[in-house]
């Protein structure tokens, strides 16, 4: 299961037809579509607020930072961080 926050990307993977707006995408980038069609992977939407990997890719304010840190089990709480 691959969780994605970009609904346009999900549509591109799920729809096997080529479109005028996507014809510039090179064929070697259609690999994800191929493995989706062969049922090796599934793809689904997840909201931006629930995207735990944002911790690794974006500067976050305190609450989402600690929520995602805890979700990744990096540290359990601020107390544990202070003891490190």
Image (spheres, rainbow, N blue to C red):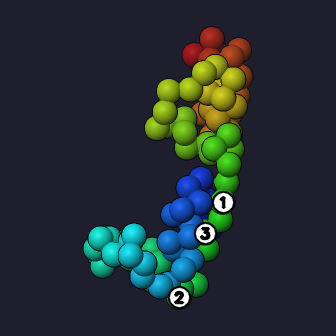
The residue located at (64%, 19%) in the rendering is: 62
Q: Is residue 19 left or right of residue 3?
A: left
The residue labelled by disc 3 is 43
Is residue 61 shown above or below 82? below
Is residue 67 shown above or below 16? above
State the image coordinates of residue 42 (x, y, percent, origin top left).
Answer: 61, 74
The residue located at (59%, 60%) in the rendering is: 7
C-alpha gap between disc 2 and disc 1: 19 Å
State the image coordinates of residue 1 (x, y, percent, origin top left).
Answer: 62, 67
Helix, strand or loop for disc 3: strand
Residue 45 - label: 1
State the image coordinates of residue 55 (x, y, percent, origin top left).
Answer: 54, 35
Sequence-first tag of 2 and 1: 2
Can residue 75 be seen in the rendering of this structure? Answer: no
The extreme front residue here reads 20
- Label 2 Cα neighbours within 10 Å, binned few <14 / some 14-19 / many ≥20: few
State the image coordinates of residue 68 (x, y, percent, origin top left).
Answer: 64, 35
> Which of the two residues, 14 or 80, is positioned nearer the viewer here?
14
Disc number lying in front (2 or 1):
1
C-alpha gap between disc 3 and disc 1: 7 Å
Is residue 18 shown above or below 54? below
The residue labelled by disc 2 is 38
Helix, strand or loop for disc 2: loop
């Amino acid at each position: 299961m691959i969780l994605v926050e970009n609904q346009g990307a999900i549509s591109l993977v799920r729809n096997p037809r080529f479109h005028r707006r996507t014809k510039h995408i090179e064929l070697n980038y259609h690999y994800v579509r191929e493995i989706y069609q062969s049922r090796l992977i599934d793809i689904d939407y997840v909201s931006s607020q629930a995207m735990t990997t944002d911790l690794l890719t974006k500067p976050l304010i305190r609450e989402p930072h600690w929520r995602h840190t805890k979700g990744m089990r990096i540290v359990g709480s601020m107390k544990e961080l202070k003891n490190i």
